[in-house]
């Protein structure tokens, strides 16, 4: 995440939390009617919302930074160190890989083996495919609702 995004998110959370806390303090210290019992609840509620907003902002920004560090660690190349030289092949061998006359087909061989060859497949997708699919599904739903609607 860029530094500008972190600064922007931090500034946003701090401004909202500060506005809530200041609003709560102003409600508590401002003038009000003598029988206004909800004034204290409103003031302390705003202060609690401000503190909760600051905590949530800190939690979210810390989580974003932590996830960014994990992503950077995952992208680093990890090479497992070898404890010993490579082991010899198993006693039963490696099959017929690379042996002449084995199951490996060489290019230009006179007698081809096997029943087919790989084929290349392509699919062309345009930008209209998604909206057309959604429009078709909406039309299908509308028609089904009209045809199968209860008639009582």
Image: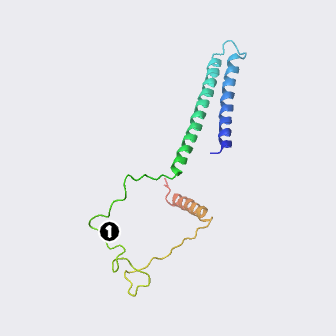
Q: Which of these two is toward me, 2 or 117?
A: 2
Report the residue at 65% width, 29% height from top.
17
Give the total number of marks visible in the rendering.
1
Q: Which of these two is toward me, 138 or 104?
A: 104
Quarter occupied by residue 68: top right
Q: Which of these two is toward me, 111 or 114?
A: 111
Quarter occupied by residue 69: top right
Report the residue at 66% width, 22% height from top.
24
**Quadrant holding the N terminus:** top right
Extreme residue in the front direction: 85
Give percent across and percent down for residue 151.
49, 55
19 to the left or right of 64: right
Question: Mark 1 = which residue?
Answer: 94
Report the residue at 63% width, 17% height from top.
40
Extreme residue in the top direction: 34
Q: Which of these two is toward me, 90 or 43?
A: 90
Give percent across and percent down for residue 115.
38, 81
């Amino acid at each position: 995440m860029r530094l500008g995004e972190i600064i922007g998110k931090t500034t946003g959370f701090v401004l909202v939390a500060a506005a809530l806390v200041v609003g709560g303090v102003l409600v508590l210290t401002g003038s009000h009617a003598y029988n206004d019992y909800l004034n204290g609840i409103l003031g302390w509620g705003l202060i609690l919302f401000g503190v909760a907003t600051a905590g949530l902002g800190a939690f979210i920004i810390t989580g974003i930074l932590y996830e960014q560090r994990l992503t950077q660690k995952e992208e680093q190349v990890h090479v497992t160190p070898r404890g010993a030289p490579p082991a010899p092949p198993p006693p039963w061998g490696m099959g017929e890989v690379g042996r002449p006359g084995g199951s490996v087909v060489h290019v230009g061989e006179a007698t081809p083996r096997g029943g087919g060859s790989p084929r290349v497949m392509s699919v062309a997708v345009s930008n209209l495919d998604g909206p057309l699919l959604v429009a078709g599904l909406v039309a299908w739903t509308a028609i089904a609702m009209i045809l199968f609607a209860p008639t009582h």
